[in-house]
């Protein structure tokens, strides 16, 4: 459904400057996601951190001609001919208004889902339950914010029969806007818990805010056994129909009479409208069972028969929330999105692939199965797929399935191949000849793309370090929240990004527009450049032998001594370089590296002013103890020294020299000392060095049980007979040893890992490549996963046992441990 720009102007009450005709099909709030410039309307949203107006020139260059703005750029008509500027007071509100008007066009059931947990799973499962019978439009992934919800609602099209949208809030007052946009006819609340509690006084406050989403719904579905929710619904004066479900109250609309579990399935017996029925669910965990009951209540209300519900429940699939990036064979990178095969999630995955910086010259390949249940006819659908893929830079498309094959002529991509099924593809030359490509795999589950991924993947090691890139972003934002909007950030990706892997982490950070990346040595910088990183890169320990490399790869060295400074000036001079940016380090108390702020500064200024090969881009120092209050007096002294000397340096130059001293702990503890820029290290990887707590865990080191054996009492385990057994024991061998970074001091019962959630102590000495653990009291099997540290066992537990700091444990994970990244 397209709207003329004229109509949009009226709908959002804008003042239009410019009179070019245009049809709007796409709404854009993030310039990186641009796909169809001619039909795109960009909303220049101002946030605490960013300002969309900045991206207008870039988007104009890329062909966008329609902008919703707060301020029309100066000389807009002259600089951007042929453009429509729609001027409004707040572009984000205009976006919401437009989505609201779009929603008004539909007199169909719209399901609004809120709650603390399970929103996305309930949304996806409802989609699985309903989409065989209806054309459903739903929020992509978890687009549930003030911006995500309008973008989701905008996706409803002329064939849509049911809408399903998530609404997430983090602060009081947000739900009202989401209510107007979604206008749910069926409200669903999953549960209520502590997420985002910091902005609410009580659980009731939060629940009441959430219930605002449903004030005009015809029906609400909720768990009556949750007393907070039940009380709040009662008190809300809600007049519509209540479909409460309960496992304790037979009067509830959906009474869950019995829940029984066997091995891998759960049978739920329920009574709805006086009829007793049951369904089987292929999951046994508590959350899944609860989510399935919520879904059942909605589906029954919509009119699904008991039989249909049971059939579809039995086939319900897990919701993969992760988009994985893996190293493939023959130089390929695999982006595995098993989320779902539909056009909206395809677009998001393509966008993700397209945004990742990558080696120049590597082809982008899409392996795509038939797309099911779009409500569009095949010709229309695959034409759209082709358009999206082309715009997102796909150069090769491999279609798998009879449907996509039938519409092969609609796919307008340079190189294309079609196969009726996955096996035929695997047996083909096309499969064998995949080389040096970035491959996006997107397939409906029935096409078994898991097998494909397995075949394409480099041999998976049993010990892996899983790296959660979303957590990196959340940590970045956590620390940004302490800073003023225009304070710059250097992200420390030295030591292979504290062990997590510099390239993928740097790609993620660059995508979030951090100002600088910092590595220790020039080679680390070169690796990043070769991987396509274009952000500014600082080299903290530049080697005298690597100046030429730094110039060639645009790496900006730190300078800490006159010897280094003179050598650098000479090297730059020899290359005929002028104005090369460097970063001046002052030693304010660490007594490691740096110029003396008292005695060196005049000479430093004189030396810098007497040449033009390099210029100071920034000046900085480092706290010795920002992580502990014990050193507050010393930190204050360090700051004073730095402040004085760095001001003096600045005064000697007319250009701006960025001043920075705060590291992660400093950002939190001394935000008033943020100056122009901060250097974020450990915090990015989720550890708060002030109290050793975990902010958002990034790295999880995992392995598997290789072998289990029963070993009798009084036998010993491992080298030098140090693991003496005091009882008959079950001992598991795991393929990780000190050569992988598992510190030998954790052995002999000093440390433990987790097996199926339970603690398993290390028995005897840890070997080079293998360790033994005691699993006598744990129900486990060969092949089970073992967590060395991570999501459930904080790395700080290990560093405390080892009497060291988490930095050492993280950076100690050796290079041979394969890193697996996910979003
Ligand atoms: C490593 C490093 C940082 C980051 O410190 P964290 O405690 O990890 O935040 C900051 N500045 C310098 C100079 C560093 O070497």
Image (tube, rainbow, N blue to C red):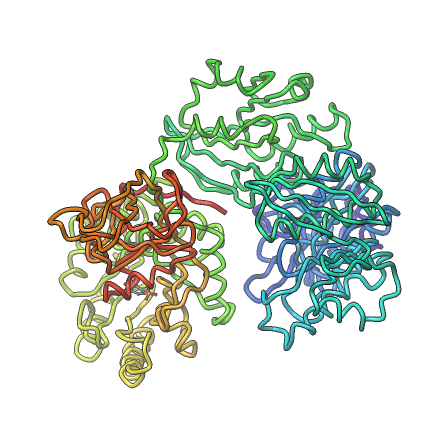
Q: Answer yes or no: is residue 508 visible.
A: yes
In the figure, is residue 332 to the left or right of 123?
left
Q: Residue at x 64, y 52 (%)?
A: 29
* Residue 622, position as x, y percentages in the image: 28, 71
Q: Is residue 102 left or right of residue 83?
A: right
Q: How many marks?
A: 0
Q: Residue at x 76, y 51 (%)?
A: 18
Q: Report which quarter residue 677 is drawn in.
A: bottom left
Identified at 75% across, 71% down, the residue is 231
| Residue depicted at 38% across the width and 58% down the height | 793
Q: Quadrant of the N terminus?
A: top right
| Image side of residue 11 versus residue 631, left or right | right
> From what the image shows, is residue 332 above or below residue 737?
above
310 versus 230 height, above or below = above
Q: Nearer the viewer, residue 330 or 203?
A: 203
Q: Quadrant of ligand 1?
A: bottom left
Q: Nearer the viewer, residue 34 or 652?
A: 34
Residue 666 placement: quadrant: bottom left
Between 758 and 9, the residue placed more toward the observer is 758
Q: Quadrant of residue 87?
A: bottom right
């Amino acid at each position: 459904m397209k709207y003329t720009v004229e109509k949009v102007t009226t709908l959002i009450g804008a003042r239009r400057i410019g009179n070019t005709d245009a049809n709007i099909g796409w709404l854009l709030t993030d310039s990186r996601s641009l796909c169809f410039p001619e039909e795109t309307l960009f909303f220049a949203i101002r946030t605490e951190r960013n300002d969309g107006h900045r991206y207008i020139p870039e988007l104009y260059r890329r062909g966008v001609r329609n902008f919703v703005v707060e301020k029309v750029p100066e000389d807009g008509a002259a600089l951007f001919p042929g453009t429509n500027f729609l001027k409004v007071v707040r572009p984000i509100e205009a976006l919401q208004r437009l989505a609201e008007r779009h929603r008004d066009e539909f007199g169909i059931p719209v399901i609004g889902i809120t709650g603390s947990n399970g929103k996305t799973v309930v949304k996806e499962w409802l989609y699985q339950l309903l989409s065989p019978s209806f054309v459903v439009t739903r929020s992509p992934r978890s687009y549930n914010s003030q911006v995500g919800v309008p973008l989701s609602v905008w996706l409803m099209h002329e064939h849509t029969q049911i809408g399903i949208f998530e609404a997430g809030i983090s602060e009081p007052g947000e739900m009202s806007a989401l209510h107007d946009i979604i206008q749910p006819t069926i409200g669903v609340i999953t549960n209520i818990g502590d997420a985002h509690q910091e902005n609410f006084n009580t659980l009731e406050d939060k629940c009441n805010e959430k219930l605002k989403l449903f004030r005009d719904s015809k029906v609400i579905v909720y768990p009556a056994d949750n007393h907070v929710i039940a009380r709040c619904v009662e008190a809300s004066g809600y007049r519509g129909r209540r479909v409460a479900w309960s496992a304790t109250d037979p009067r509830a609309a959906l009474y869950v009479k019995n829940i029984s579990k066997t091995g891998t399935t759960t049978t739920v017996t329920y009574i709805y409208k006086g009829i007793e029925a049951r369904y089987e669910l292929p999951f046994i965990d508590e959350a899944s069972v609860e989510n399935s009951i919520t879904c059942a209540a909605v589906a029954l209300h919509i009119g699904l028969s008991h039989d249909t519900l049971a059939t579809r429940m039995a086939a319900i699939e897990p919701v993969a929330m992760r988009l994985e990036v893996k190293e493939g064979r023959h130089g390929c990178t695999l982006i595995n999105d098993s989320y779902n095969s539909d056009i909206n999630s395809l677009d998001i995955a393509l966008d993700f692939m397209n945004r990742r910086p990558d080696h120049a010259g590597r082809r982008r390949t899409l392996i795509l199965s038939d797309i099911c249940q779009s409500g569009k006819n095949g010709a229309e659908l695959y034409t759209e797929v082709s358009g999206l893929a082309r715009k997102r830079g796909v150069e090769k498309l491999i279609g798998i399935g009879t449907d996509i094959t039938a519409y092969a002529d609609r796919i307008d991509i340079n190189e294309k191949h079609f196969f009726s099924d996955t096996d035929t593809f695997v047996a083909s030359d096309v499969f064998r000849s995949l080389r040096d490509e970035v491959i996006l795999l997107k397939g409906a589950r029935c096409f078994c793309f898991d097998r494909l991924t397995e075949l394409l993947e480099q041999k998976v090691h049993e010990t892996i370090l899983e790296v959660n890139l979303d957590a990196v972003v959340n940590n970045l934002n956590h620390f940004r929240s302490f800073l003023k909007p225009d304070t710059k950030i250097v992200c420390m990706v030295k030591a292979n990004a504290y062990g997590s892997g510099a390239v993928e982490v740097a790609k993620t950070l660059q995508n979030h527009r951090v100002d600088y990346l910092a590595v220790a040595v020039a080679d680390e910088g070169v690796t990043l450049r070769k991987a396509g990183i274009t952000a500014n890169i600082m080299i903290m320990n530049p080697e005298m032998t690597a100046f030429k490399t730094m110039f060639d790869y645009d790496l900006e060295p730190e300078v800490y001594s006159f010897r280094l400074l003179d050598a650098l000036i000479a090297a730059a001079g020899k290359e005929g370089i002028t104005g090369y940016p460097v970063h001046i380090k002052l030693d304010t108390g660490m007594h490691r590296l740096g110029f003396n702020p008292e005695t060196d500064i005049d000479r430093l200024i004189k030396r810098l002013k007497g040449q033009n090969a390099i210029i100071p881009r920034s000046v900085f120092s480092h706290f010795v103890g920002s992580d502990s209050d014990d050193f507050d007096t010393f930190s204050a002294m360090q700051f004073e020294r730095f402040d004085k000397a760095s001001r003096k340096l600045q005064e000697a130059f007319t250009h701006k020299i960025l001043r920075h001293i705060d590291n992660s702990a400093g950002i939190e503890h001394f935000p008033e000392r943020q100056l122009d820029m901060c250097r974020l290290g450990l915090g990015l990887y989720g550890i708060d060095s002030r109290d050793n707590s975990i902010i958002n865990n990034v790295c999880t080191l995992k392995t598997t049980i290789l072998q289990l054996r029963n070993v009798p009492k009084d036998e010993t385990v491992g080298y030098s007979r140090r693991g003496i057994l005091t009882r008959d024991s079950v001992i598991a061998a795991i393929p990780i040893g000190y050569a992988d970074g598992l510190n030998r001091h954790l052995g002999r019962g000093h440390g433990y890992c987790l097996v199926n959630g339970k603690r398993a102590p290390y028995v005897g000495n840890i070997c080079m490549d293998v360790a033994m653990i005691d699993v006598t009291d744990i129900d486990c099997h060969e092949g089970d996963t073992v967590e060395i540290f991570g999501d459930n066992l904080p790395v700080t537990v290990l560093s405390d046992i080892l009497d060291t700091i988490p930095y050492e444990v993280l950076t100690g994970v050796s290079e041979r441990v394969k890193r697996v990244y996910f979003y």
